[in-house]
Amino acid sequence: MVVPDRTPVEGWRDALDDGDRRMVAEVLGEVRGVDRLGVALSGGVDSSVLLALAAVGLGCDRVLALVGTSASLAAEERELAHRVAADLGVGIVEIATAELDRPDYRANGPDRCYACRDTFFTAVDATVTARHGLTAVAYGENLDDTRRLDRPGARAATEHGVLRPLATAGLDKAAVRRIARAMGLRNADKPAAPCLASRIPHFDPVTEDKLSAVERAERAVRALGFDDVRVRHHGEVARIELPEDALPAALGAARAALLAAVREAGFRFVTVDLAGLQSGAFTLPLVSVR
């Protein structure tokens, strides 16, 4: 937990090795070149570390957390984003986005994330930047993200001139988590949580009802003690993905409770995928070039 004086825990740099300190210095150097910075905040560890470093480099009063709200953002993620910003003493602005109004988003092709990011950054440009005096916007892409083919949202960030200080400094996911732990961020070890639309197979249209069913099901599964989960939406069928070490419990002592909880969320049939948790499983087979 970040201490209440609006700074990361005392001496956090001392907990880092020389390589991490060098990369942190690069991030701080980039953000200090900005007069007033908006940071896209999802509640995940990458954007939280970026927000924390921006607050260190610029001071809390020159940083603003930007949260895009829509049916694709789980309520728990929205609440966590607010808690992180409050921990850091950084102001936060919610931007209602309307990606579900875009045919290319609803169609759910492999470039769906581009439509989502483009909608968010367009809304920031139109409604937030001038009102809050922002001179730049940044988001939490890390180095590992730049190496993946299933990240079309990065193209939208480039088109809107959005900064990516973590990736530029060479911070991969492991380094981001080390820094988050050193700074005392509440979500340092939080599992990745892509947007709810990523649970719907490509070319199966995204609807608010499907997003809501996924959110209810995942909340129910987490309430049973499974912190890292994806509930994939296949019509009447919910396909639960869990880390491999969680499969024995899911198929054993928790099986009946999982079945009841996910049915209560609106699915008729409930399965547990024996392959375990699979990041990018819908998108990667369809993407050949970035």
Image (cartoon, rainbow, N blue to C red):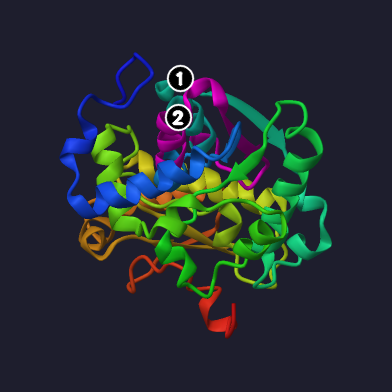
Q: Residues within 10 Å of mark 2 (few under 14, many from 20)?
A: many
Tag 1: amino acid: Gly
The kind of secondary structure element at disc 1 is: loop
Q: Nearer the viewer, residue 202 or 174?
A: 174
| Between discs 1 and 2, the one toward the N terminus | 2
The residue to which callout 1 is attached is 89
The percent coordinates of residue 85 (x first, y second) are: 48, 27
The percent coordinates of residue 197 (x first, y second) are: 61, 57
The kind of secondary structure element at disc 2 is: helix
Q: Are marks 1 and 2 in contact (CB under 8 Å)?
A: yes
The residue to which callout 2 is attached is 55
Identify which residue is drawn at 69% across, 55% down: 116
The percent coordinates of residue 211 (x first, y second) are: 63, 50
Closer to the eye: label 1 or 2: 2
Identify which residue is drawn at 51% across, 27% down: 82
Q: Find the magenta span and give its range.
A: 49-76
